[in-house]
Image: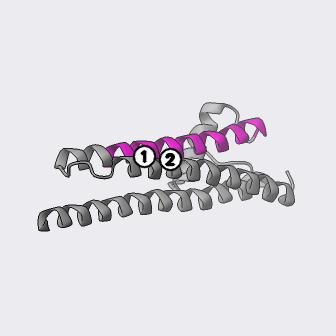
Amino acid sequence: MSTIGQLLLGALLIAITVAIHGAVMGWLTWQLGRRRGALPSLWNHYSLLATVALWCVVAHLVEIAIWAATYYWQKVMPGFDIALYFSAVTYATIGYGDVVPPENWRLLASMEGLIGILMCAWSGGFIFAIVTRLQHDATAHRQS
């Protein structure tokens, strides 16, 4: 595929990735709003954080699978299992290097790495914001 073709396909995949992540983060924010006022307890905090982390991972896995399906569809990788593995290590910027795309597909893979960094940062920032809010709420509860 041409450089322009990869850029356009990459832009589409980035838009889809951001839309999925935004939908999950929005849904989680809505769910968190419904839980406001729950009794602050260690168990509630752990279960909340575990649930949020799980949903973040699910979002990442769906996004990874979409990139993998594209690699498989475009015959960049010989099988979906290899494409999924390659997509996961690229998205997470692990980059073992044991599976690499053909030279004419490396731009798209680089774009996946870039959006993977951003989506992981978004999830990390979201969890950080929740922890900050939990600490704030716990402090306010102790002072009242």
11 sits left or right of 143 in the view: right
> Disc 2 to disc 1, how far (Cα)?
6 Å
From the viewer's side, name the closer residue of 32 and 6: 32
Q: Are marks 2 and 1 in contact (CB under 8 Å)?
A: yes
Q: What's the magenta region?
A: 49-75
**Coordinates of residue 38 in the picture (x, y in percent):** 26, 48
Disc 2 crowd rating (10 Å Cα; few below 14, some 14-19, many 20+) is few
Against 71, residue 107 (above or below) is below
Callout 1: 10 Å neighbours few (<14), some, many (20+)?
Answer: few
The three-letter code of the residue at mark 2 reads Trp
Dot 2: element: helix
Q: Which residue is mark 2?
A: 27
Element type where label 1 sits in the image: helix
67 is within the stretch colored magenta: yes
Identity of the residue drawn at 81% across and 56% down: 8
Q: Position of residue 69 (x, y in %)?
A: 69, 37
Look at label 1 and name its amino acid. Answer: Gln
* x then y, percent, for residue 124: 42, 59
Picture quarter with the C terminus: bottom left
The residue tagged 1 is 31
